[in-house]
Structure formats: structure tokens, C-alpha cells
Image (cartoon, helix red, strand yellow):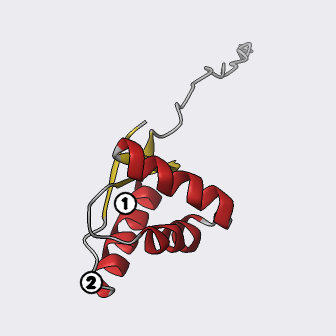
Amino acid sequence: MVIKKQEESTLETAATRVKPPPLFKVMLLNDDFTPMDFVVAVIQKFFGMDREQATRIMLKVHREGLGVCGVFPRDIAATKVEQVIAYARQHQHPLACVMEEN
């Protein structure tokens, strides 16, 4: 009778790093027609900011041509852009909202 020695096998776990998904800035663009109060209301409604923060971003949009309202994963950023544009059109304003990779 022959007895075989059973070999032990161990699995080594390889450390794999999954990099986080890219983030996107959601920005409002300046135009000469959308009232400042409406822009402040949009920032409050869709980006959850208080009136003071929203006013600061609105003034940045007004003075510099664009203002960042938040940084989000791609799907959330795209949804925010769509919501803002639809809301602005519903209220007959040409407010533009875009996203770009951070």
C-alpha cells in the first residue's frame, strides 16, 4: 500500500485597487436674460444650498461667466444638469447648465 502525501495549497490574495469613478463638476453658465433671483432659487432647489451660498455662486456666474454648483459622480451630475435645464425651460428661461470632468 502506497500513501501519498497531500500537498497543501494556499491561495494568495492579490491586492487590487479599484480606482474611484471620475467626478464631474456641474456648472451654471451666465446669460443676459435669466433673473438673478431665479438662479439663486435653482441653486437652492437642486443643489441644497442656503440662500447665502447660492447668492455667492450666482454672483460668480454673473461676474465670471460660470460657477460650479457641485461635484458628483457622472450619473448624478447628468441628472442635475437635465433637471436644471428642464426647470429653466419650464419657467421660460435660457439658463444653461453643463458638466465637465473634474
Q: Is any part of residue 17 visible from this angle?
A: yes
Residue 69 x, y percent position in the rendering: 50, 53
Residue 42 x, y percent position in the rendering: 48, 71
Q: Is residue 3 above or below residue 93?
A: above
| Earlier-in-chain disc, 1 versus 2 | 1
Point out the image quarter for the C terminus: top left
Q: Which residue is mark 2?
A: 92
Q: What secondary structure is marked by label 1?
A: helix
* Circle 1 or circle 2, nearest the eye: 2
The residue located at (52%, 31%) in the rendering is 19
The answer for how far apart the CA atoms under marks 1 and 2 are is 21 Å
The residue located at (26%, 62%) in the rendering is 32
Q: Amino acid at mark 2?
A: Gln
The mark found on residue 78 in the picture is 1
Q: Quadrant of residue 55?
A: bottom right
Q: Is residue 41 above or below residue 25?
A: below
Q: Nearer the viewer, residue 62 or 21?
A: 62
